[in-house]
Image: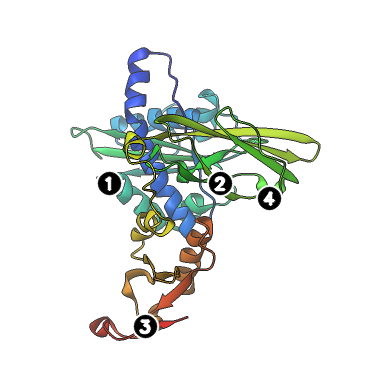
Amino acid sequence: MCLLMLPLAAETSTFHAQLPQLHAWTVLVNRVRLWYGAPPLKLNVQLCEAAYAYAEELVQNGRLSHVDAQGHRADYRVSAAGYFYWRLGENLAAGQPSWERAVRAWLNSPSHRANLLAHEYRELGIGHSFNDDRRYRTAWTQLLGTRRHVYPVVINLDAYATDTPEVIVYVHGAREAVAMRYRVDEGEWSEWIAPMEWFRCYLPAVEGWHTVSVQLQIGDRIFESSDEIWLSREFVEVAGERESNHERCAPLLEGFGASVECTTCGEHIVHQPYHLPLHLLGADDFKGIAHILLALHLAQAHLRASVETAAHRTLPHGDT
């Protein structure tokens, strides 16, 4: 969780008020990236500042370009905001009524899609601006970046809040590490263990902010990162009624037309996206679902594909 700190109190208040929305948009991006096998990104304060400022300029000027009015590109703008990058990418869109439509437009453009799904990025900045009196009315900016020796931790695809203390954590840099350990809040560190990109842990059942910190041993150095998430009152009031994994991953899958069910014997069945018959189902669809399930520790799930046409979906299904 990133807490956006701006010089002016009014600006700070505005940004903090938008944090839940920014994180919701980040989760949407991360769902798309996860679907295509790319790691999730973590919202970054400096990238958001640069993205917001440029979105405002795009709307005011009514000109969609990666070069601003002063002749500066994204590298200058993010450096001025204090983000000293190793890798950097920028996607721009204008005229779309929503973030979802902007993301869809980028996915339909080969160059923007390559930026959006690139594996080497670790952090994300989002900016948007609206003005009904201007040419485009809306502008959307997306900055994707990586800093050297910064390995972000991402809880629940960078969600703002959770209603269950069971969370799933992604660790950038785990593949480069020889060992890792973690702790929750100010608790004791775990033992050093083999590095894992994905792991599950439990927050204290107390409403409020909770932090998961991770230390990675890479070479002869130790790198530490953390992420925060808000545990909501709803869970605290009904402690013990935990949502199961297959219920929690349903929203993750529904954006792709897929669904998951748990059978009486505990087997998880994932139904193919968009109810496509088997001969129309692409291999990428199965790979995307399998990647999501692996991230949610449902590695033994069976992928069920129907062989009937859309007009005969009531026929029995076969496992594949």
- Display colour scheme: rainbow
What is the count of numbered marks? 4
| Residue type, mark 4 in image | Arg
Task: Residue at 36%, 13% (x, y): give it.
Answer: 9
Specify which label sits upstream in the sequence, 4 or 1. 1
Q: Secondary structure at mark 4?
A: helix
Q: Give the vertical position of 7 relative to 96 (above or below).
A: above
Q: Is residue 137 left or right of residue 144?
A: left
Q: Which residue is mark 3?
A: 317
Q: Nearer the viewer, mark 3 or mark 2?
A: 3
Task: Residue at 57%, 52% (x, y): give it.
Answer: 119
Q: Is residue 213 left or right of residue 232?
A: right
In percent of width and height, residue 150 lies at 63, 35
- Within 10 angstroms of label 3, few (less than 14), some, or many (20 or more) residues? few
| Residue type, mark 3 in image | His
In percent of width and height, residue 170 lies at 56, 46
Q: Is residue 275 left or right of residue 208?
A: left
* In contact (CB < 8 Å): disc 3 and disc 2: no
Q: Residue furthest left?
A: 133
Specify which label sits upstream in the sequence, 2 or 1. 1
Q: Nearer the viewer, mark 4 or mark 1?
A: 4
Q: Which residue is mark 1?
A: 96
Task: Residue at 24%, 45% (x, y): give it.
Answer: 97
Specify which label sits upstream in the sequence, 3 or 4. 4
Q: Nearer the viewer, mark 3 or mark 1?
A: 3
Specify which label sits upstream in the sequence, 4 or 2. 2
| Residue type, mark 2 in image | Tyr
The numbered mark at residue 148 is none
| Residue type, mark 1 in image | Gln
Q: Which residue is mark 2?
A: 170
Q: Which residue is mark 4?
A: 175
